[in-house]
């Protein structure tokens, strides 16, 4: 039986998803009045949700302005991707030797769904399935501490992921296919290397497009 979410959990989920999907502009002030009206919730759950999002790095709080969207600076982006490259590489390595047949099927389905969305021109949906693919690899590693550590890092970087263009989405699909084949034959060395290269490619793309304003040769 599915558990019913509390009002605070509903507020937290809705606000975080809006941030991840870039539904707010960078200068949007997340006032309680604005969010209560937008999501038809009372002040208490909205306030508690904002406090949790602040602790996770999604929003900032200042006494003069209140809550606002936390910006991902160049150094912060570098730190996030350094951690992701190391941890996701290890997750892929463990996944290749611990994954179940059911989880292999889930990875295949997610990759197919991501490719189908890409071919239909729905890049946003393709990237949703792309991130679900990463989360499945994390779960299949059977290391809950690493999964928890990666969960927040992936969600923070998702704000950049959902700005991806068709070129990087196509490359991501090819790298996911390569990774899946390595996982299927339990090649732990190759699985780790492919995932690390995949995350490094994403870092290079985001640096080039959102911080250095330069084209990236991929």
Image: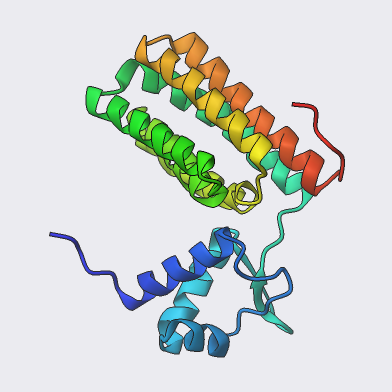
Q: Which quadrant of the structure image shows residue 97?
A: top left
Q: Which residue is found at the position 48% from the left and 16% from the top? A: 191
Looking at the figure, which quarter contains the N terminus?
bottom left
Residue visible at 53% across and 49% down?
A: 122
Please tell me whether residue 16 is drawn above or below residue 37 in the rendered image: above
Residue 176 is at least partly visible in this image? yes
| Image spot of residue 131 (x, y percent) | 48, 42
Q: What quarter of the picture does the C terminus occupy?
A: top right
Relative to 148, 159 lies left or right: right
> Where's residue 4, x and y in %?
22, 69
Which residue is at 51% across, 30% downward? 88
Residue ID at (55%, 24%): 174
Observer able to see residue 135? no
| Type of colouring | rainbow
Tell me residue 34's x, y (percent): 57, 87
Q: Is residue 32 above or below residue 113?
A: below
Residue 117: x and y, percent?
A: 47, 43
């Amino acid at each position: 039986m599915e558990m019913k979410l509390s009002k605070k959990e509903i507020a937290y989920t809705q606000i975080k998803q809006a941030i991840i999907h870039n539904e707010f502009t960078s200068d949007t002030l997340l006032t309680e009045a604005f969010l209560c009206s937008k999501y038809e919730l009372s002040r208490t759950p909205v306030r508690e949700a904002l406090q949790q999002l602040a602790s996770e790095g999604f929003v900032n709080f200042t006494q003069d302005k209140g809550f606002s969207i936390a910006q991902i600076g160049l150094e912060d982006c570098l730190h996030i991707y350094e951690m992701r490259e190391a941890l996701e590489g290890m997750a892929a390595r463990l996944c290749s030797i611990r994954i179940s047949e059911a989880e292999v099927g889930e990875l295949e389905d997610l990759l197919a769904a991501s490719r189908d969305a890409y071919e239909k021109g729905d890049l946003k949906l393709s990237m949703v399935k792309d991130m679900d693919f990463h989360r499945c690899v994390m779960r299949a590693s059977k290391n809950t501490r690493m999964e928890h550590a990666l969960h927040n890092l992936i969600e923070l970087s998702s704000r950049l992921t959902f700005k991806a263009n068709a070129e990087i989405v196509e490359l991501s699909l090819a790298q996911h296919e390569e990774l899946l084949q390595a996982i299927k034959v339990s090649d732990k060395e190759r699985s780790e290397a492919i995932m690390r290269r995949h995350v490094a490619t994403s870092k290079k793309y985001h640096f080039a497009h959102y911080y250095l304003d330069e084209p990236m040769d991929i």
